[in-house]
Image (cartoon, grey):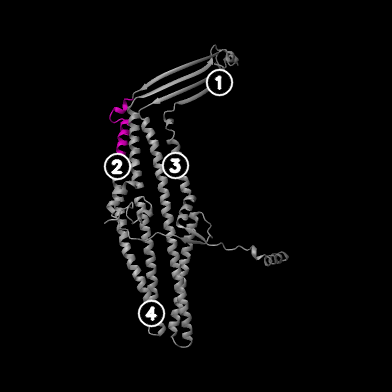
Amino acid sequence: MKFVRFRALALLMFPIWALPIAAEPATLSLEDAIQRALDQSINLRREAIDLALADYSARRLWSEIFPGINLSAGLTLLPQTLFTDPGFRYNADELRYSLNLGLALSLNPSLRASMNRIELAFRTQLLSYEDARRQLEIRVIKDFLRLITMNENVAHMEENLEFATHTMNNNRIAWQHGHISELTWLNSQLSVETARYALNTARGAYQNALWEFLALLGMDAGTDITFTGTIDIIPILYDPEQLILIYLPRRPDIINQRQTIERMELGRSITSLSSRSPTLTLSTQWGTHPGQGLGFGDPLAERVSGSVTLNIPIDSWVPGTRQSQNIRAASAEVEKARLDLQNIETQAKTEIRSLISNLRNTWESLEIARLRVDIAQRTVDVTDEGFRSGTVSFQELEDRRRDLSDARQSLLLGELNYQNLLLDLAAALNVEWRVLTRQQPGAILMPEA
């Protein structure tokens, strides 16, 4: 009991300045968010490790023709006989030792193709790293814009709750004085609770999305964030066929498929040359061992040998053999990869055309959505004046407020959808999203006439 009292007294005497103080809101721009995500991404670090390994191999192509070097040493401890005459008897003169050093070099026309494949592996890994960076950047921008939209939606719902609360307070006084019916008073209470429920749901969704976003950036979950920056919403009037002509070959998936075809062609060359071309093997060996059979007391003797071997394969030229089938299978894989490239190009063209069409349709919808908000706002103002003067019912006012809320939410979601489509188009063209918003003469992407 004394210990409990001591703890309670200590808590009462705990200085106020020792309590945690809420941190100041941190301002986070779009560029800062992208950079933080790139710095914190574990997947990018893994890609960077693979890229470094591929770069290390590409810079050391000489390893493909580096000769094989081996060093061996041996020691014989037991005598040469065990059960026959003279039987087992330890004899130091029977000790044997040997030391050998050998070098071997094999030359085949497939070496050049092997080197090219190593260089191709580096270029493929570099493409994978750059594409991972671009995809992460687009993801961060989308999450950033989504949080801004959700935050604005929360602000609108707070405004709705404030209005509903103000109306309820006025209706309470009016009901107490007998100016309105009890049904109107109950409806105003219901409106407040409905607005509070919607606001609580929106705040919870925003908080969960914010925590996920902060984790992606490597920031503390309790950080209060103020977002700055956005993507300008401007009409996109580019000709899809012109975009396809200029930027289709630069898409990462198409480049990757072309590299796959090149890699398979190199693999086919390696298989064919290794199976059908002569292989020249140069080898030399130096060794030392006892010369007179006197064990360790034997004078040192050494031997140097060298050989040149030319291996000419024959079976791979015979149709139907395993080696011949391997060459045939490699050629078939190349043809399949080329068909896959045609399929990817067709899908990419369809995607670009669809994105341009969706951007145009969404822009027209945004213009309608803005007009809806203006009309709904004016309608609410007029209806509110009528409600105050007693010429408009409370239900009519609630309906008009609901129309305004729906119009605002539709506009917010439409703007977010338009920005996401713009980012998807940038990803489909493999360009920076800022390039798409350059409408001045001389831009990289020329608008259609």
Relative placement, left or right, of 53 versus 266 is right
In this rendering, the label closer to the viewer, 1 or 3: 3
Query: How far, Cα to Cα, is label 1 from label 2?
Result: 58 Å
Say which label, 1 or 2, has the lower sequence index.
1
Residue at 52% from the left image edge and 17% from the top image edge: 288
The 10 Å Cα crowd at callout 1, few under 14, some 14 to 19, many 20 or more, is few
Relative placement, left or right, of 380 versus 11 is left
Q: Amino acid at mark 4?
A: Thr
Say which label, 4 or 1, has the lower sequence index.
1
Q: Position of residue 273 (x, y in %)?
A: 33, 29
Quadrant of the rendering where the N terminus is positioned: bottom right
Task: Please give the residue where the numbered disc 1 appears in the rendered image.
Answer: 75
In this rendering, the label closer to the viewer, 3 or 2: 3
Q: Amino acid at mark 1?
A: Leu
Say which label, 4 or 3, has the lower sequence index.
3
In this rendering, the label closer to the viewer, 1 or 2: 2
Q: Magenta segment range?
A: 313-336
Residues tagged 4 and 3 counted as in contact (Cβ below 8 A): no
Examine the image and state in which quarter residue 157 appears. bottom left
Mark number, residue 51:
3
The 10 Å Cα crowd at callout 2, few under 14, some 14 to 19, many 20 or more, is some
The 10 Å Cα crowd at callout 3, few under 14, some 14 to 19, many 20 or more, is many
Query: How far, Cα to Cα, is label 3 from label 2?
Result: 26 Å
Query: How far, Cα to Cα, is label 2 from label 4?
Result: 66 Å
Classify mark 2: helix, strand or loop: helix
Examine the residues drawn in magenta and state their main secondary structure.
Answer: helix
In this rendering, the label closer to the viewer, 2 or 4: 4
Query: How far, Cα to Cα, is label 1 from label 3?
Result: 45 Å
Quadrant of the rendering where the C terminus is positioned: bottom left
Query: How far, Cα to Cα, is label 4 from label 3?
Result: 65 Å
